Every structure is written in C-alpha cells, then in structure tokens.
Image (spheres, rainbow, N blue to C red):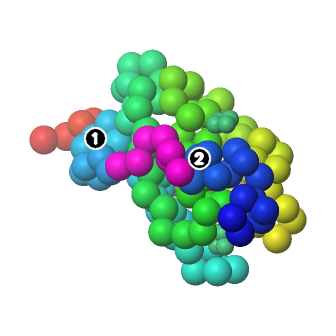
Amino acid sequence: LLTSRLYHEKVVEHYDNPRNVGSFDKDDPTVGTGLVGSPACGDVMKLQIKVDENTGKIVDTCFKTFGCGSAIASSSVATEWIKGRQMEEVLTIKNSDIAKHLSLPPVKLHCSMLAEDAIKAAVKDYQKKKAKREDNNSSPP
Ligand code: FES
Ligand code: FES
C-alpha cells in the first residue's frame, strides 16, 4: 500500500482509528474551541476542550480535522495527550513533540503545527469566555 510506504505506522494507526473525533457545543461555558488553518495547504483543524471550572483540568476533548493523514493523526495524538491535564500544562506541548512521536517527515511538520496551534487556541478561547463571564458578574446591576 502506498500509504504504508509514505507514512509511519503510528500515523496510519491514528488515521485509521482516530481518537476523540467529535464536536462539543461551542456555546457551552465549559468548552474552549480552537479553530486553525494551515497557510501552507489550506487544511483546517478544530480542537475543543471541556474544562472543570474549579480545577482548570481538561476533562474531555474532541476534534474534527479537514486535512491530510498527518494532520488527522496529529490531532488524534494531541487529544490523547491533553485529556486529563491542566490547561497550563498542555500549553507546553510542541508540534515537534507530536511530529517526533509520529515520525513525521520534514515536509509534514506544518501538519503537527496545526495541532499545537489548535491546543493553544482552544485554551485561549476558554479563558476569554471565562474572563468575560467574570466581568459580567462583577459589573454593577
Ligand atoms: Fe497514540 Fe502515541 S501512538 S499517542
Ligand atoms: Fe496540510 Fe498536512 S498537508 S495539514
């Protein structure tokens, strides 16, 4: 098979059995949504987190990726790595870690970059929504 020659087996495995595919309601106050696109190829990745408001822990996560096999595999790995972790912790995940884990070739590095960007965007979105709510709560009636 062409794919098995071009892609490392972990990529194929995540591509065939992507983890945590799905969608959360983006208006849910406990949900952060990261939607990013790759300028290099136009592929798009949506990654969402569900956060425990009291602990800041990511209790659930899901993604939808319209992109190449490496982008799908990168999002799948990303969701596996961030589930159950603290928001600050997952901000340290680098695309190079994901690329290394999947043995992505250099031309596919931008695919893992989407995953790093999507994680950061999801956390940012959650924090923005939370700050806005707190702002509303503290404003005088
Ligand atoms: Fe799935 Fe490592 S092979 S996260
Ligand atoms: Fe665009 Fe992989 S080729 S994300």
The three-letter amino acid code for the residue at tag 1 is Pro
Crowd around label 1: few <14 · some 14–19 · many ≥20 (10 Å): some
x and y percentages locating residue 21 in the rendered image: 41, 48
Upstream in sequence: badge 1 or badge 2: 2
Residue nearest the viewer, comparing 60 with 9: 9
Q: Main secondary structure of the magenta part?
A: loop
Find ligand 2 in the image and state its quadrant.
Answer: bottom right
Q: Position of residue 117 (x, y in %)?
A: 62, 57
Chain part drawn in magenta? 16-22
Question: Which of 3/133 is in front?
Answer: 3
Residue with the mark numbered 1:
29
Q: Position of residue 28 (x, y in %)?
A: 25, 44
Q: Secondary structure at mark 1?
A: loop
Instruction: Say what amino acid the circle numbered 2 marks.
Output: His
Per the rendering, the mark at residue 18 is none
In the drawing, what numbered circle is on residue 14? 2
The quarter of the rendered structure image containing the N terminus is: bottom right
Residue 72 in view of the camera: yes
Q: Quick check: 42 above or below 119?
A: below
Tell me: residue 22, above or below residue 71: above
* Magenta span includes 18: yes
Q: Residue furthest right?
A: 106
Q: CA distance from mark 1 to mark 2?
A: 30 Å
Residue at (57%, 53%) from the top-left corner? 15
Corner quadrant of residue 5: bottom right
Q: Residues within 10 Å of mark 2 (few under 14, many from 20)?
A: some
86 versus 105 height, above or below: above
Q: Nearer the viewer, residue 69 or 121?
A: 69
Looking at the image, can residue 128 be seen? Answer: no
